[in-house]
Amino acid sequence: MIEATKLSKYFRQPDGSILKALEDIDLLVPDSQCVLIAGSNGSGKSLLMKLIANLETPTKGSVRSSEPVGLVFQDADAQILGDTPLDDVFFGLRANSRLSKDEAKKTALKALAEVGLENKAQSPSHFLSGGEKRRLAIASVMALGRRTLILDEPYSNLDYPGVKSVNALVEKLKADGMTIIILTHELEKCMGLADRFIVLDKGKLVFDGDCAKALETDLETWGIRNPDKNGNPKNLVWR
């Protein structure tokens, strides 16, 4: 479970003024829920997730989670450090756990199998497709035992097969009972996966509710393209 209470983050500008990047965010995400968070550039989506993942400190308010949260960044290449997928996951485990080399290798191979990359374990990481790199980044986080994942713009620069492969993995993780938070503006690719839809606008939470209800609202007011006004959100997913 993730719970944020009056969560706010302010920054002092060069001219001395205060930028309220996030203000008074109240948010409760139960375990095993898939949440889609949308908002235009600068709405505060990524900042909110960094606060939840303890990568930023709030100016005021609080955020807590029942277990550590794994954050997968928009640029998968920036999160991949190993020469091969096995090296990458193994490196993260050795740096962030007390597993022996043999235990770390076994855990790394299991994580790669969970994301469908067991056959690419020894392939050069830079030869992976965009979708495979995204899944590798997810595997590296999952190997650390994270049961709550935040995916920041997971469809960025992916082709159709890449999007489908990421969505298939999200559906598998949902079926396994994991908590998934997806930050994206590409609603047509994944809205059908979500149990809940949230909109941030100018640092404030302006919508939190059912996906079907969201489609009936004027999303363009918040700088979000409505993919199918009055449509069925279950149809909005690339498979």
Image (cartoon, grey):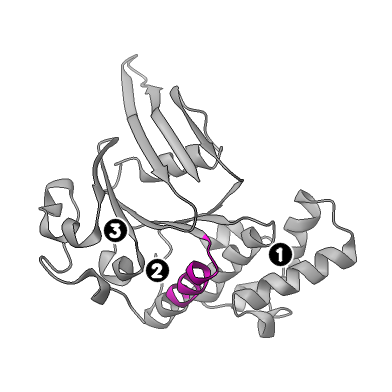
Q: Residue at x 25, y 70 (%)?
A: 188
Specify the amino acid type for callout 3. Answer: His
- The image shows residue 74 at horizontal and vertical percentages of 46, 57
Task: Tell which tag, 1 or 2, sits nearer the viewer.
Answer: 1
**Of the image marks 1 and 2, the number of the one nearer the N terminus:** 1
Q: From the image, which quarter does the C terminus lie in?
A: bottom left
**How many neighbours does mark 1 have within 10 angstroms: few (below 14), some (14-19), or many (20 or more)?**
many
Which residue matches tag 1? 88
Which residue matches tag 3? 185
Give the extent of the magenta segment: 166-178
Q: Is residue 74 above or below residue 24?
A: below
Residue 117: quadrant of the picture? bottom right
Specify the amino acid type for callout 2. Answer: Asn
**Of the image marks 2 and 3, the number of the one nearer the N terminus:** 2
**Of the image marks 3 and 1, the number of the one nearer the N terminus:** 1
Which residue matches tag 2? 157
Residue 236: quadrant of the picture? bottom left
Q: Residue at x 71, y 64 (%)?
A: 89
Q: Is residue 170 magenta?
A: yes
Q: Regarding mark 3 in the picture, which secondary structure is present there?
A: loop
Q: Regarding mark 2 in the picture, which secondary structure is present there?
A: loop
Q: Regarding mark 1 in the picture, which secondary structure is present there?
A: helix
Marks 2 and 3, Cα distance to the nearest angstrom? Answer: 13 Å
Q: Residue at x 25, y 36 (%)?
A: 202
Q: Nearer the viewer, residue 84 or 111?
A: 111
Specify the amino acid type for callout 1. Answer: Asp
Q: Is residue 129 above or below residue 15?
A: below
**How many neighbours does mark 2 have within 10 angstroms: few (below 14), some (14-19), or many (20 or more)?**
few
Residues at badges 2 and 3 in contact (C-beta under 8 Å)? Answer: no
